[in-house]
Structure formats: structure tokens, C-alpha cells
Amino acid sequence: MLAHEALWASGQLNPSEAFDELDKLIFCKIWDERRPRKVGEPYDFQIITVSKKEEKDERKRRLIENENLCNRIKALYEEDRKRDEEVFRDNIRLTPEKIRTVVSYLESVNLSETDLDSKGRAFETFMGSFFRGNFGQYFTPREIVKFIVDVLPITHDSKVLDTSCGSGGFLLYALNKVRDKATEYYPNYKNDSRQYAKWFPYWHDFAEKNLFGIEINEQISRAAKMNMIIHDDGHTNVITSDGLVSDTVIKECTGNKGFEYGTFDFVITNPPFGSNIRQTEQAYLKTYQLGKKEEDWLAVKQKVGSNTRDGQQSEVLFIEQDYHFLKEGGMLAIVLPDGILTNSSMQYVRTQIEEWFRIIAVISMPQTAFTANGAGVKSSVMFLQKWPKKHTEKLFAKKKSIEEHLLKKEDYIAKREQWDKEIKQKQKEKAASLKSRTLTSVTAIKQTEAYKTWNTELLADYARKVDELKSKLTDEYQQSKQKELPDYPIFMAIAEEIGYDATGKKTAVNELDVIEKELKKFIDSLS
């Protein structure tokens, strides 16, 4: 934090720009520690003083030291940029004096040898302050992240994705989970070269080949990479991209072939809430099933024309995108606003979820879960498992069969058409009756208050009949679904205390710990 404050406190850089410059130097520091060097060979990321014999003037000595340091850091940076162009795009924009200030804070710290917990706390303190001030929506509280990752049966063979990875919290905890398992298997890896030869690839292959993240914000994407590198890597497959474009577009734009639909064992994510994806802005909306208007099985005539919605909430589209990325049997853990689970207008989303996924669990979070990060939307965590395609098709066909049966049983279409005819006939008779008494035109009669009042009452009466019939059929449909569709248990829990309050301050009680144990048992029982 001191290094960050030193860069922006003078006002020359805003906090966001200062963050960018600092993460460049941290990368340089990490790579400098990892470079092979001979015994006694000095590190480049340190202040090397100039003796008085070389230069008597103190001010000039400092300028020479700064210039030498700046040259070494920029050389490191250019070398690093060749290694990872996705992370390093812009030049270092700090003055030699500012570079010296940052180096003075970091040169005595060995990031490579610092234990993971300490590095994690330091990074989270820095990132937490920065994100809460500027990008709170990219930061999922560690208690929720830990709960989700600990519940899921992620192993070193699992392929894991976060389609809205933010600062990389879910990926980092997944990596640490696998690394902890490696240490359980090879507890003496530090002292036994044979154990180390197994311990290192066990988790590092997972980090390099099986961890994937997508983040639309370039600055935050870079921060996620830094987070992973600080924790001993796993940044290789973190990319900057719109997480809602197709896998084909992602592969073409990034050159990363790992982002393939139907290949991931786990998707763990907290998508952005409230953003409305509009068809006029993002043409890909029409490719989404949830980007289309739902068909009303009780409509007499389906609407003609484009069935693409004008817009759709981003969190709804991420449900579908995550479904595509998962392999059959793969699991999705996603944070969603409660409106998707409760609002009647979102029933079509819930219907689609039950066709695509086996609903494993719904865990309700407290209203204050994301308040400290600038989001006050009441939310829950859903755990879902992708059905096999044949099962989804079977469910869809069964629902259609139920609908067709009920429509036929009630003679629904014919009844609705008959009612429409009755309305028109009664309107015609009423107009003729009034005309015979007033000797005015039918058009004029229909403009009178007497006719309008009568017609409003007529239409309202038939509307009530239609609503009653629809309600009856809807109830019968729900009852038939319960009887004819596969039934299975769903784990549900309400967490009122989750280890921190609305300000983000730690509290003594975290009910997620108890829920985690029970949910893990429940998931184990499913296999």
C-alpha cells in the first residue's frame, strides 16, 4: 500500500494509473527473482549505490543511481514483455525517482520465498483497498469464494473456468486447493527431491493447463494475472475478452485454443449484475436462447417477426454461456441476484435452467453480502450440474407433450377462437341495436360513451374468462410436471452470518462453514 500511495499521492497519477505502474514493477520484481544467476551476482531490482569516490556531489550520485536503476528495470521490463505480451503492453511511465521509491519498498522482500498465505494477505489488502475504491464489482469476498471452491470436488485433473474472473479469486483458490492436495500426498517435498519431482507437476500442470479465466476489463485482467503469478503462477490462460462472445471468437482473438465449448469440468463465477446487453450494441444477443422472447404455449397465435429481445441482463446470458462451456456432467457454481429465482417475469429463465441443469443447491446470501463492494442486490449461490444433451431433449419433449395434452383436453384453441367470435358477434349486435334506435352510422355509434362503456365491460368479462382458463391450465401443467418429470432432492440453505458485516469488517460467526460441510456430503451422495 505504501508503494501505491507513493505513486499517486502527489497527484501526478490517479489511483488507477498508479496501480498500473505498480503492477508493472511487481512483475519485474518477480521475474528478476526467478531468473537464473551465478553465486554473488546481484539482482537488478535493487538500488545499487554509487560511492563518494566515483562522485562527490550527493545530488549527482543520486541521479546516477536512479538512472542506472531505471535502465536495469526497463531492461527487465522489455525482457518480461517478450515473455508475456498480454500482461505487458505499455511502457513504464514512471520517472527514475518514482521507480527508486517503489524499489526501496520492495527490494528487501523475496516474493518467491514468502509463504503463500502472507503473499495472499498482502495482495488482498492492496487489491481490496483499490477495488473497493474503484472497481468493487470485480472483487468477490474471500469467504464466499472459499466456500464455493471448497464445496466443489475440484482435482488436479479438472479443467476450471471463470467467465467473469475479475481479480482471479476463484482461480486462485482453486489453485491453492490443488496445491494443498499435492502437499498432502507429498508432505516431505521440501526435503525429498523424489517427492518434489511429483509434487511440483501435480499442481503446476493444473495451474498451467487447466485454469482458465476471462475478464472484459483489461486493467483488471492484468491484475488477475499478477495475482496468479504472485501465488506461483496459473496466469497463462487468463485473457482479456468479453466473456459473452462465442468460443470461436475468443479463440480467434486470443489464439488460445483452450476456450472450447463442452470441455470444462467446473465453471465458478460471479458475473456482473444489472448490465443490459442490447441487440443494437451486441449482435451476439440473437445467438442466445435466453436472448430470445419465450414462446407462450397459451397464446392463440404466435407473434410474427424477429423473436430476439431488445436486450437481456448480462447475468442471465452468463448462465447460458457457462452451460455451453461445461461438459456433460460438469458443474456450475454461480452467484445470481435473487430476482432470477423469485420474480414471475423470470420464470422462463428458471424453466430453461431446469432443462439444462440438475439443480444441486441454492444457498441464500445475506442482503449485506456484497454491500462493502458497492453492490446491494440480494443474491444467492446456485450449484448446478449440466444434464446430458439427451436428457435435456427428453425434458423438453416431455414438457411439450404435457402442454399439447392439456390444450387438447381443454379444446383450448377452439374455445379461445369461439370466444373471439362471440365478442365480435355481440359487438355487431349491440351496434345494430343502437343504430336502429338512433338512425346514426355504426362508426358514430362506436364512438359514443354508452357503447365504449358497454364494450369495455364485455371485453373485461371475456378477459376474466381467459385468465381463469389460463390459470387452470397453468396449475394443471405444474401438477403434471411434478408427476411426470424426474424428481430429485435439492439442497437449500440460508446463510445469515458469513464472517463479515456490511462494511467488510470481520465477524466471529460464519455459517458458510457449517453449510459447506453438509453440502459436500450432499454432493458426495450424488455420485
Image (cartoon, grey):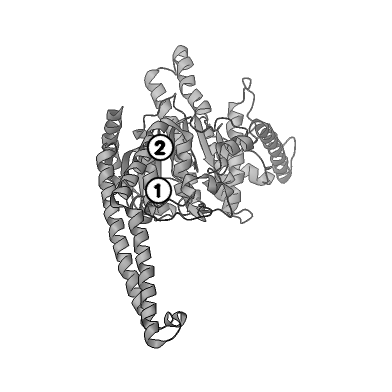
**Relative to 510, is 27 on the left or the right?**
right
SS class of the residue under badge 1? Answer: helix
Q: Nearer the viewer, mark 1 or mark 2?
A: 1
Is residue 375 placed above or below 461 in the rendered structure? above
1 and 2 marks in contact (CB < 8 Å): no
Q: Report the disc number at residue 349.
A: 1
Q: Is residue 9 left or right of residue 91?
A: left
* Left or right: 300 as drawn, with respect to 133: left
Q: Residue at x 68, y 44 (%)?
A: 96
Q: Residues within 10 Å of mark 2 (few under 14, many from 20)?
A: many
Q: Is residue 266 above or below residue 94?
A: above
Residue denoted by label 2: 332
Which residue shows up at 32% across the image and 61% down it?
A: 466
Amino acid carrying label 1: it is Val
> How far apart are the alpha carbons under marks 1 and 2?
16 Å
Expressed as whole percent of the image width and height from the top left, the position of residue 38 reads 63, 20
Q: Residues within 10 Å of mark 1 (few under 14, many from 20)?
A: many
Q: Quadrant of the C terminus?
A: top left
Task: Give the structural element (helix, strand or loop) at label 2.
Answer: strand
Where in the figure is residue 331, as x and y percent of width and height?
39, 34
- Residue 27 figure quarter: top right
Image position, residue 163 (x, y; %): 49, 40
> Considering only order in the chain, which callout, 2 or 1, is on the residue closer to the N terminus?
2
Position in image of residue 518 (x %, y %): 26, 35
In this figure, what is the number of numbered marks?
Answer: 2
* 325 or 75: nearer the viewer: 325
Specify whether residue 314 is in view: yes
Residue type at tag 2: Leu
Is residue 86 among what the camera can see?
A: no
